[in-house]
Amino acid sequence: MALSRWEIDWSHMSCTGGSCFPPVVMTASHSDSLVVLFGATAGAYGAKLGSDERELILLVWQVVDLPSKKVGTLHKSLVKADNLDLSDQCREVSGLTPEGLGKAEPLDRVLQQFSQLVSSDLKVLGRSSYTLCSDGQLLIRQVLHPETSKKNFLLSDCFYSFYDLRKEFHTCYPSSAPVKDQTIKTMAEYLGLGTDETEEDFGVWQVKTMVAVIFSMLSESCNHIFTEPETVKYKYETGPCSKSETVDSETVIRARGLPWQSSDQDIARFFKGLNIAKGGVALCLNAQGRRNGEALVRFVNSEQRDLALERHKHHMGSRYIEVYKATGEEFLKIAGGTSNEVAQFLSKENQVIIRMRGLPFTATQEDVLGFLGPECPVTGGKEGLLFVKYPDGRPTGDAFVLFSCEEYAQNALKKHKEILGKRYIELFRSTAAEVQQVLNRYMSTPLIPTLPTPIIPVIPPPYTIATGSIRDCVRLRGLPYTAGIDDILEFMGDATADIKPHGVHMVLNQQGRPSGDAFIQMKSADKAFMVAQKCHKKMMKDRYVEVFQCSGEEMNFVLMGGTLNRSGLSPPPCKLPCLSPPAYAAFQTAAVIPAEAALYQPQALLPTTRTPQASAAAPPTVTYYPAQAAQLYMNYTAYYPSPPVSPTTVGYIAAPPGAVAAAATATHTPILPQPGALVRMQGLPYNTGMKEILSFFQGYQYAPDDYNGLIQLSDQARSVLQAPKEWLHADSILLLYNFSGQPSGEALVTFPSLDLAKKAVAEKHGQLLGSRCVELYLV
């Protein structure tokens, strides 16, 4: 490291203005000494310092004794960055070169020397402590804290308390420019100080000018006192959040693209240097109860939130994280809770929360405590356990556990996939917001026995969603969840005149809530192309919306339950989709199930007996849905499960006998009775394909000749039934996907008989496929 010193003669001081890189002044807490600190990075400067993640390359500092108005030695130190590629602006303004920086010391060594030199200067001045004070927040919050966090070394305590010189200056001179518009140059000009920066080396004139500004503030005419420093939180504090709280929308952001395994502490580390509110990290879960790569983060004030937005596309590991504005309502929807039981559970502060998944339904508190053992004692014993249950009191197989320290939590995590009873148990880090979210979702899970009546068959003929390969449709992705038809029409602007009648299709989840997607049928492919070009990433309610051109075939595929992703189409999660409740009154049309979808029966309607005699006597089975859902478009989501003990996918209601009889005499496409039994596979490796599953079930084969003549079938249905001589083939397997188009780790396999299915479950349950233990359930 090249370290140089300048002795300052204040009688000949030339104060210069203009700031390329905001300097920082540091003082000890409750002390009479300040340390003026200036820093520069290899990239952006000024108001954008730290926004590009570039490393620190320069530190300049000087100690100031406030009572005597004496100064110590001015120090300038270059910092060797890992990436010495300097931006053009940095080269031009600073005059630094990669060659010069290559001879410097790394940041950890520079900060060690900084502490030693400051202590030496304080001793000369007869002082022993200091507090930090900066020209703005950026150097401390946006550069030093994030960079040292990424490089895994700790900053000394002095960097957690500092004065913001801009705020102090505005307090001292209320008629000066607003804080956000202040710079070293504007402060110097306001005081009438000289600002010729060419007389000094880069960084030196900034420090000298800041010291001169401080001395002016200490003069008898002002007599300013530094009393309330800014603070940086040492660590993120966990805590509960009530739905009755008021959350300022100006303090909330949405982080997107997070690694699925990231915890609230990982997110707090990503925002290191910024003050997150207590319990302010809420990890979002998808419909399957798994983290979806998003989180809502609440900061202590709008200033901290604005700084967080500057970290848009900063990296967490190898992934860049998108940061957008969000609302307090969105935060409360995810993190807020109303349960007294949950509030009491989360009332113990500074606890590490672990989520247990896959517990036997008969597991008791004693069983869980015994599983964890004495090496990881639970806080409060039984009071530190929270079992998740359905509204009717049935266990879900999930539980949350509190530990008083990281060591106990780590010991518990080592038990991941160990056996309790006959089940392996998964353990994950969790958060207070996730506890609220899981409990809220389970408590709102509808119970099948209470679904409304009457029910009617869903094969209405009036209107069919257009299909075909012509790309005359557009897909809107990332819509605000509060967006309605009017918002979409306003978003489309003049292009609304080119929308086909009945051409707006909102995609809803099974709870009837918007999924953030919509499809629009345009009058031509050219119109669809123009809309996609014009509206892509256009803002709607503070969110940018992605607009893609697609075909009617692709649109119909998604509305029927499939997913679209960059690699193409992903099959629907089940052969026959369920319906979504309405979100709008306009453009309502009847949902139509394609003829090929009618060839498959949902698992809830599989015959209870598999004998030829029973099947021969059974009338053709028809799928029924609640009456109010009959006029809606379809899209699939499962109820909120928690693998590996999730309930089987529901959403199909068997019709009453009278309705079945009526349906049997109705004129519609003949429906194939589904022979055999359905087995659900859970815990599959995410790269599992048809070939691996077929190999897993090798030997479970069946020739379907015995099913001939069981029922009067159409030629199409008979060909489907008779095609394979080995019944367990690729068409017997259905891989399940999540809404992101990614494999969910689950699959459905149709076996030719109930006995064969039971045999497969008994013999194959718990065996390895690849490196993972696969669970099988008869559904």
Image: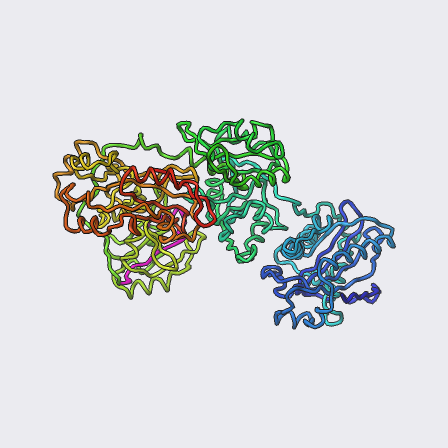
Q: Is residue 618 left or right of residue 101?
A: left
Highlighted range, magenta = 470-485
Residue in front for this viewpoint, 149 or 691: 691
Tell me the quarter of the image containing the N terminus: bottom right
Q: Is residue 490 left or right of residue 59?
A: left
Q: Is residue 295 left or right of residue 583?
A: right
In this figure, what is the number of numbered marks? 0
Outermost residue toward the front?
699
Tell me the quarter of the image containing the C terminus: top left
Query: What is the x, y in percent for residue 118?
Result: 80, 55
Residue in front for this viewpoint, 548 or 485: 548
Residue 176 visible in image: no
Q: Is residue 476 magenta?
A: yes
Query: What is the x, y in percent for residue 230?
Result: 68, 48
User: What is the chief secondary structure element of the magenta stretch?
Assistant: loop
Residue 748 visible in image: yes
Query: What is the x, y in percent for residue 537?
Result: 42, 59
Q: Is residue 434 left or right of residue 235?
A: left
Residue in front for this viewpoint, 5 or 365: 365
